[in-house]
Amino acid sequence: MNKFRVALLQLIPSNEPNENLDKGLKYCKQAKEMGADLALFPEMWNIGYNFPPETNSEKLSKDAIDSNSAFFKEFQNLAKNLEMAIAITYLEKWNGLPRNTVSIIDYRGNCVLTYAKIHTCDFDVEKYLTPGDDFYVTELNTKNGSIKIGAMICYDREFPESARILMLKGAEIVLVPNACPIEINRKTQLRTRAFENMIGVAMTNYAYGKQDCNGHSLAYDGIAYGEISPNNIESRDMLIIEAGEAEGIYMAEFDVVKLREYRKREAWGNAYRKPRKYSLLISEEIREPFIRN
């Protein structure tokens, strides 16, 4: 693979899953026409990250779907027909409480990765969700070659361990479905995850008009230093693209050849880590000032 093109589907959702289905299919077709290898939806697209008033576990579960649902099957069929991968997000039916999930469907229509959000926002409505159990990486085959893909969802990005584990499992590109305001600090989080792990990061957010979301979907290529002139390597901006607030498709093109060359020679990622010194990171003890009810 030389280039990997991710279509960031920065959309405004409906409160009706069937309308989101139709709109999602329409924008995937447009993404294919624009040359995308993969189309990435914002967080929990099937319900548009819309929760019923006075949400409780029973009301939330009625909108949950799984891979056997008509909604999911439509995207599988479309991926196969378009020969384009689709990262579809949804409220997933689960034993007990539902999950906040993204599934990656390859260009043959096969589901090759399903990840449920581990860092659920337990201080808010996501306290009614079941957290995921692990981070996963898959080798995604496309019409243009293969690339190793992982995923994390929204609040996951605020924990460096999320991207670190994906890097350690071999991820080259990390997909990030999102549903929150994107400002300088959250942009910096994603830039940092790309820099410290030497991974590409592609994030899709809802467009302005969806509650407090404000667009600014973006992608970083993970290459922090490059040759700006012959034999002159300097720091460079990793930003590939940043959308404005408007609804639309924003194309992020990753130079896979350059990313792989960079990862072989530079000092970050897993090149010089000292894991034996990090035992405190797996302690479950929480002390003040971080104790929450």
Image: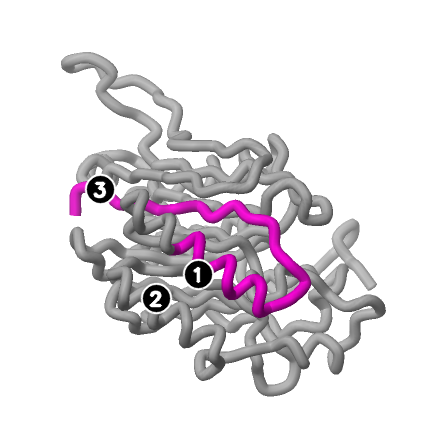
Q: Residues within 10 Å of mark 1 (few under 14, many from 20)?
A: some
Quarter placement of the C terminus: bottom right
Rendered residue at 30%/25% (across/down): 225
Query: Residue 69 or 55: which is nearer the viewer?
Result: 69
User: Which badge, 1 or 3, is on the more N-terminal residue?
Assistant: 3
**For residue 75, above or below residue 62:** above
Residue 162 image offset from top left, x and y in percent: 48, 55
Q: Residue at x 61, y 34 (%)?
A: 185
Where are the magenta residues, as a range?
Answer: 1-28
Residue 227: quarter of image: top left
- List the residue tagged with mark 2: 78
Q: Nearer the viewer, residue 115 or 30?
A: 30
Local SS, label 3 = strand
Which mark identifies residue 25?
A: 1
Q: Is residue 171 left or right of residue 179?
A: left
Mark 2: secondary structure: helix
Tags 1 and 2 touching, CB below 8 Å: yes
Q: Secondary structure at mark 1?
A: helix
Query: Taking the image as drawn, is residue 275 in sight?
Result: no
Question: How many numbered circles are shown?
Answer: 3
Residue type pointed to by label 2? Leu
Residue 50 vs 112, above or below: the answer is: above
How crowded pointer 3 is (Cα within 10 Å; few <14, some 14-19, many 20+) is rated as some
Front one among 163 and 87: 87
Amino acid residing under circle 3: Lys
Mark 1 or 3: in front is 1
Report the Cα–Cα distance between label 3 and label 2.
22 Å
Give the percent coordinates (x, y) of residue 193: 45, 42
State how far apart marks 1 and 3 are (Cα). 24 Å
Q: Which residue is mark 3?
A: 3
View extreme (bottom): residue: 95
